Every structure is written in structure tokens, then in C-alpha cells.
Image: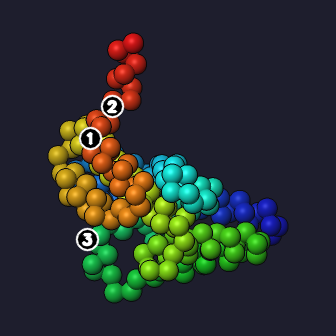
Amino acid sequence: MSEADRIVEFLYEVGQLKRLPRAGWLFAGVQNPESVAAHSFRVGVLAYAIAVQEGANPDRAATLGLFHDVPETRIGDIPYVGKLYLDVKVPPEAVARDQVRHLPAPLAAHIEALVAEHEAAKEIDHTPEARCSRDADKLELLLQAREYQAAGITKMERFIQTMQASVVTDTGKALMESALRIVPSEWWEAFGKH
């Protein structure tokens, strides 16, 4: 099998994220929740914006956000309530290592490092880019909860409150305050006023 074949197989696996629903939204009554890929896209954009404002490397932060949920192709998007019942928790870094083991070594090493760096933001020893990516992950969930809330889904307050306590960067906190104040549809409603 060629290197190109192995990369394409990995890309087909990553494509599963486009079809994998974010499971936590199902508990809140969202009938057609966003996919993990849709979540990861906005995490990447958010991580880039936060990193620019924080003086971190925006390209690195966006890449961390883009790749942070790749292990979910193998383990699924397990909601918090489900994680309480798992005896064995395989760290995302171990899943990523297994996912990329057939890729060309330099590519595999890059992907493993991205997942590990994002996950390190949970620990004391982390990079500014990981902190920006982690904040972006939390803020993206908050933004999505606000959008679902605006669409009439009522069980969003718990998600919003939980994410507020998780944001650590100054930029992330400022974005959070704005997200809580600005109505999700405000950006396009302004077009009708001109």
C-alpha cells in the first residue's frame, strides 16, 4: 500500500466526523444536532481569533482546534453522562497514535503532537496555543447552545453555565460575555435594516 493510499484511508476515517452527531445535544432535545466536524470547524476559527488577540500563534491554535476531536472517529462522541460509566478511559492521545500508525512517519508525528498538545491544556503544563484551542472548544459549545436556545430548545442553560466556568483566556472571557449578550441572529438581521 502506498503512502498516498494510507493518507486517503485516514481521510475517509476523518470523514466520519461529518456524520457523527454531537451526542450531548441529544439529551437536551436537539433532534438534528451538529456534527463533530461542524463543531471542529468553528473551534478552529475561534482558536485562530483567540490566538491572534492573545499574541499566540494563530495557525498552530487553529490547527489544534481542527484536529482535537479526530479520535472521536474511533470512540464516538461520548457525552459526560456516558463517561461516568466507562471503566477504561483511553486517552485521546492513545487513540490518535493508533489512528495514524500507518501514515507516513512525519505526518503521523504531527497529528499525534496536535492531539497531545490540545489535551495538555487540561494540565498545568500547556502552550498558549493549546489554551486558546481549549477555550475555543468551550466557547464553540456555548455559541452552539445559544443558537439552539434561540431556535426554541429550552434545555441549554446547563451547557451555557458549564462552559462559562471553563474559559480561561482574557480574550475568551470577553468573547463569552459578548456571546451571552448578542442574539445569535443579530449579524444577519442588520442587513434588513440598511
* Residue type beneath disc 2: Ser
Task: Tell me the residue that label 3 is attached to.
Answer: 81
Residue 190 higher or lower than 124, as above or below: above
Q: Secondary structure at mark 3?
A: helix
Q: Position of residue 149 (x, y in %)?
A: 23, 43
Instruction: Please give the count of numbered marks on the rendered protein.
Output: 3
In this rendering, the label closer to the viewer, 1 or 3: 1
- What is the C-alpha distance between the residues marked 1 and 2? 12 Å
Name the mark on residue 185. 2
In this rendering, the label closer to the viewer, 2 or 3: 2
Name the mark on residue 181. 1
- What is the C-alpha distance between the residues marked 2 and 3? 31 Å
What residue is drawn where x is 20% and y is 38%?
A: 152
Pick whichever, 117 or 3, lies toward us.
Answer: 117
Q: Secondary structure at mark 1?
A: helix
- What is the C-alpha distance between the residues marked 1 and 3? 29 Å
